[in-house]
Image (tube, rainbow, N blue to C red):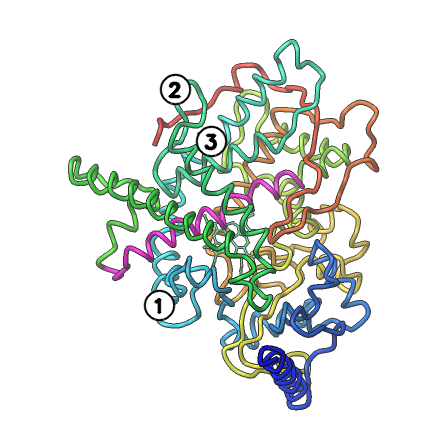
Amino acid sequence: MAILHLIISFISIFIAYKLYNRLRYKLPPGPSPLPFVGNLYDIKSVFFRCFADWSRVYGPIISVYFGSHLNVIVNNSELAKEVLKDQDQHLANRNRTPHIEKRSRNGTDLIWSDYGPHYVKVRKMCVVELFSTKRLEALRPIREDEVTAMVETVFKDCTMPENKGKPLVLRTYLGQMAFLHITRLTFGKRFLNSNGEIDELGQEMRGILGSGTTLGTKKSLAEYIPFYKYLFKAENDAFEALDARADRFAKKIMEEHTLARKKTGNTKNHFIDAMLTIQNEYELSEDTIIGLLWNMIAAGMDTTSITVEWAMTEMVRNPTIQQKVQEELDRVIGNERIMTEADIPNLPYLQCVIKECFRMHPPTPLMLPHKANTDVKLGGYDIPNGTTVSVNIGAIARDPKVWKKPLEFTPERFLKEDVDMKGNDFRLIPFGSGRRICPGAQLGIYMVTSMLGQLLHHFTWALPDGMGPEDVDMMEQPGAVAHMRTPLQAIPTPRLPAELYKRVAVGTV
Ligand code: HEM
């Protein structure tokens, strides 16, 4: 009986508090929430599409409750500017669920840190030390090595007699490339053995990443439900074990690097060596370094491979556009050498294709959610302190008020108008904008452009026999990053002399 009273009192307090907030604040409109679960009961699995649908009913700024937690989602470019520019200083915190709070050790990394002195210090270190033009240039050979290694593997596989004319699952190659590149850049190791297979450490790394994704997907919304701790005890325990495993992995490699530096006196360009060398200068704790290493893997790996998979999908659905890119590549590079990053400024049409792909298929269509550090106004509505605020760049991309024929893949739109995509034009913000803009944007652009450019220079790509453009599944998989729901299958036909398909290797580190 006492328990029943307790539950009734709890529900009454909850409802009274919600009513009080409703009367106190003029909140953005949105679908009706239920007690405890909020709007989780009718959220569709691909969030950005669901929010875009709701914004057509309730207006460009909407309230959506995850459990009892208020999320405000803005769905047009004017409101994106309010969030990321006009009110940026009040909306640059992060919402940490209980698990993220633990994993990031109360936000002592970069991604999950609130905006404050720690964030400013770590962000400055990233911009000045890790993503500087000098560092990116020093790391270029590693990027070129990995892109050419991918091309070599595609060539080997598609020229095997038994594979002739058969489609390849492109994600396998893009995923492997992104994994090898970003882990190498971050941890200073190429996780492949002499047989070209992922080595033991690489398997451990893959295991950690795979378990993280599975557990994260299971729990991402569950954490908003009251009593989740008790309801999802097994997952919580598994998460704690995974965090410990990830820490052990990072510490082991950090120790190896420290020993190697002591022995040889040489510092390498990889992020791990860079951070360990400047650890004292920037007063970086071990927790912060470990957090940053995993941040780079989490933020930099899937984003690039997803973008290229979507871009290649558009290329096989639109052979005329593919041909136009190839004509440009042939004109600028010819068929006696391979494309390098130095060619990018001379490939304006390829750059337009990349922009159009970032417009239509941003890999993080809701960016990373921000959080209010005080009460603010957005679009004339009240946003209470602590509210999570997301910008729906997927909806902005499909807004007919800012884009002509938004659902058509038309790179030419960017030949007519040179739209900035690094945070200065709120119609196209795949990397965000303002204080929390992606620090890896230039690296991401280099990667995506080189991967797409080389794949199109080296091969002509076609859909499997009997499949037309309308048969390609253009929907996203649920999750924070927008993987294609159905992996692309395409048939490559080599178009350059065979000697140009060799990996340009720079060793194993
Ligand atoms: C196609 C490539 C990429 C895209 C589209 C992309 C997009 C984004 C977006 C939308 C954000 C959130 C911005 C915000 O919260 O307002 C972000 C944050 C971040 N990205 Fe990227 N990213 C890409 C590649 C990379 C790469 C290659 C790295 C590093 C190796 C990286 C590292 C980060 C980090 C550390 C953050 C967190 C920044 C912070 O919280 O201050 N990203 N990225």
**The residue carrying mark 2 has its beta carbon less than 8 Å from ligand 1:** no
Q: Can you identify the residue that label 1 sits on? A: 118
Q: Position of residue 7 (x, y in %)?
A: 61, 78
Q: Amino acid at mark 3?
A: Glu
C-alpha separation, residue under disc 2 versus residue under disc 1: 42 Å
Q: Can you identify the residue that label 2 sits on? A: 194
Q: Nearer the viewer, residue 198 or 240?
A: 240
SS under mark 2: loop
Between marks 3 and 2 in the image, the one whose residue lies nearer the viewer: 2
In the displayed structure, 290 sits above or below 5; it is above
Relative to 66, 474 lies left or right: right
> Quick check: is 102 in the magenta stretch?
no
Q: Position of residue 54 (x, y in %)?
A: 77, 66
The magenta span reads 281-310
Q: Residues within 10 Å of mark 1 (few under 14, many from 20)?
A: some
Q: Amino acid at mark 2?
A: Ser
Q: Can you identify the residue that label 3 sits on? A: 146
SS under mark 1: helix
C-alpha separation, residue under disc 3 versus residue under disc 1: 34 Å
Q: Quadrant of residue 49?
A: bottom right
In the displayed structure, 258 sits above or below 295; it is above
**The residue carrying mark 1 has its beta carbon less than 8 Å from ligand 1:** no
